[in-house]
Image (spheres, rainbow, N blue to C red):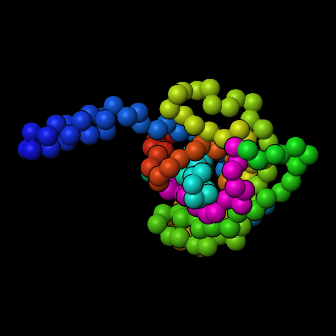
Amino acid sequence: MKAKNIFFTIILFSIAFIAPAQEFLSSNVRVFRETGETISFSENEIAVIKLNPQTNQFRADFCVLLTRKNDTIEEMNQQLSLDFKGQFPISDLDFYDLEGGSRKLYTIVGELTINNITKTYTKIDFTLHRSNFPNIYSPNVLSYPYNINFQLEINPTDFCLENILPDCPRTIFVEVKDGIINKFSNGNGKPHCDTRY
């Protein structure tokens, strides 16, 4: 009996080790900072956007650097953890018919977390359009046939950013254009954020 238990335990561990890890595709993000009459922006930030087909939970995990190119090295290390999650309003996105509705505006209500402070975010308005590159990157990458466009408008004082950021902007806009929506079945897969100088 013990031999059978050991045999089954070895098989289970072997299956766990050979099961492929799920990979996620990142999307490009632009950040705009409004300070008085001045608006500055940065590109090449990233987000990993995910949608769970069983629960319809939508999640966007961002790697966003909210400083400018001419800030000091110490200031440039202010990489912020910025995450949004909410319920996606469309069921079965794989089979959703977008014909004639590519300009339609959809809405997600959810929570925005920045540096461990969570606030109910009024809503994200977004649009969808058919992806030109569906699921061709890797057998471990599963994505939906539509790309997403949306923008987050952030009041820095809601998240105590005036205590972190020098010359704190009045408003921060985080924009995703042509975002890839990854399929996922659990909460793992948050992007590793590298500070860029």
Q: Position of residue 66 (x, y in %)?
A: 58, 53
Report the residue at 74% width, 35% height from top.
131
Where 87 sits versus 187, above or below? below
Q: Position of residue 108 (x, y in %)?
A: 70, 63
Which residue occupies the foreground of this view, 60 or 70?
60
Whether the magenta-drawn stretch holds residue 78 is answered as no
Q: In which quadrant of the rendered view does residue 134 lie?
A: top right
Whether the magenta-drawn stretch holds residue 82 is answered as yes
Report the residue at 16% width, 37% height from top.
7
Which residue occupies the foreground of this view, 109 or 56?
56
* 19 on left or right of 40: left
User: Can see residue 196?
Assistant: yes
Q: Position of residue 27 (x, y in %)?
A: 63, 40
| Quadrant of the rendering where the N terminus is positioned | top left
Q: Position of residue 80 (x, y in %)?
A: 51, 56
User: Can see residue 27?
Assistant: no
Q: In which quadrant of the rendered view does residue 8 lie?
A: top left
Which residue occupies the foreground of this view, 97 or 37?
97
Report the residue at 46% width, 46% height from top.
189
Report the residue at 69% width, 55% height from top.
91
Residue positioned most to the left = 2
Q: In which quadrant of the rendered view does residue 6 lie?
A: top left
Highlighted range, magenta: 80-94
